[in-house]
Image (spheres, grey):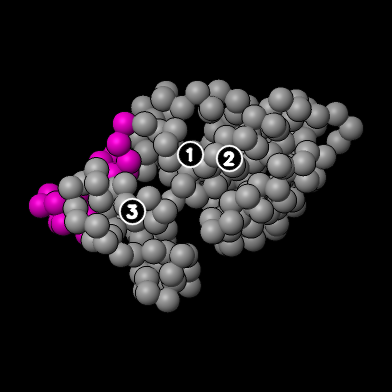
């Protein structure tokens, strides 16, 4: 780990790089023509009132199940039959992808890339949720050495094979990589595979990125 290229920052996408849909309810309601306050589910921001999110956290349903349920629910609110998460994301988030990228993520990614370290994304559903064309409208993604997306690999975190795929693509061992995710089970999976980790709290993105940059000798200001 003596040179920059021998270390990598591996990021989840949804929640870590992009803001969660929970954080953008107001703009989603405008985009969808819904009255303010219609979207009341708040996930980790009010888990006591979001029973479906609590069920997902207990492992009773998958994250994909959660978002499929919410997509169908919102579709009904606008009088349509939505059968996938991609429809919800496209309709709720409008035409400007950068508007939903965390400014902390944008800054941290540039810092890591400029310092010469490798960058990777390890996502369970990047293109499944956002659509394949989403990537083409995000110049920031050109900074990444590799993007491993289970939309295509069909191997979901925390399966050890998911972490092995990104390590192989980076040509690095697990100890040389720091993985950031907002789901504890994915962090647990990474730890079991020997990666360094940061459990990202979507309620405090600044602290998450500050912790992620520290092992690279970078100060997040």
> Quick check: 14 above or below 77?
above
Secondary structure state at the residue bearing disc 3 = helix
Q: Residue at x 75, y 25 (%)?
A: 116
**Cα distance between the residues tagged 1 and 3:** 15 Å
In the rendered image of this protein, does residue 199 appear above or below residue 116?
Answer: below
Look at mark 3 in the image and give the residue it sits on: 25
Which residue is painted at 89% across and 32% down in the image? Answer: 2
Mark 1 is surrounded, within 10 Å at the Cα level, by few (under 14), some (14 to 19) or many (20 or more) other residues, namely many
Query: Quick one: SS at disc 2?
Result: helix
Quarter residue 66 falls in: bottom left
Looking at marks 2 and 3 on the same chain, the residue that comes earlier in the sequence is marked by 3
Magenta stretch encompasses residue 85: yes
Crowding at dot 3, Cα within 10 Å, few <14 / some 14-19 / many 20+, comes out as many
The one nearer the camera, 192 or 34, is 34
**Disc number at residue 105?**
2
Q: Quadrant of the N terminus?
A: top right
Q: Residue at x 55, y 33 (%)?
A: 147
Measured in 3D between alpha carbons, the distance from the residue under mark 2 to the one under mark 3, in whole angstroms, is 20 Å
Q: Do labels 2 and 1 touch, CB within 8 Å?
A: yes
Q: Main secondary structure of the magenta part?
A: helix
Mark earlier in primary sequence (1, 3): 3
Q: For the magenta stretch, what is the residue range?
A: 73-95
Find residue 156 and report its horizontal and vertical position in percent: 50, 50
Q: Residue under label 1, please give it.
A: 101
């Amino acid at each position: 780990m003596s040179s920059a290229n021998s270390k990598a920052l591996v990021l989840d996408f949804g929640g870590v790089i992009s803001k969660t849909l929970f954080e953008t309810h107001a703009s989603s309601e405008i985009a969808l023509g819904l009255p303010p306050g219609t979207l009341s589910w708040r996930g980790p921001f009010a888990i006591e009132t979001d029973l479906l999110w609590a069920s997902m956290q207990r492992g009773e349903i998958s994250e994909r199940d959660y978002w499929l349920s919410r997509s169908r629910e919102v579709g009904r609110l606008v009088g349509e039959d939505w059968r996938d998460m991609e429809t919800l994301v496209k309709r709720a988030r409008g035409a400007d992808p950068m508007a939903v990228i965390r400014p902390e993520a944008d800054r941290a990614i540039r810092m890591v890339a400029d310092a010469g370290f490798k960058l990777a994304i390890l996502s369970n559903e990047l293109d499944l949720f956002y659509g394949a064309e989403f990537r083409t409208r995000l110049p920031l993604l050109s900074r990444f050495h590799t993007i491993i997306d289970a939309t295509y690999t069909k191997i979901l975190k925390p399966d050890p094979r998911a972490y092995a795929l990104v390590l192989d693509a980076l040509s690095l061992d697990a100890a040389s990589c720091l993985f950031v995710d907002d789901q504890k089970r994915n962090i647990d999976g990474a730890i079991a595979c020997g990666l360094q980790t940061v459990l990202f709290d979507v309620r405090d993105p600044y602290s998450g990125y500050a912790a992620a940059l520290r092992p690279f000798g970078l100060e997040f200001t």
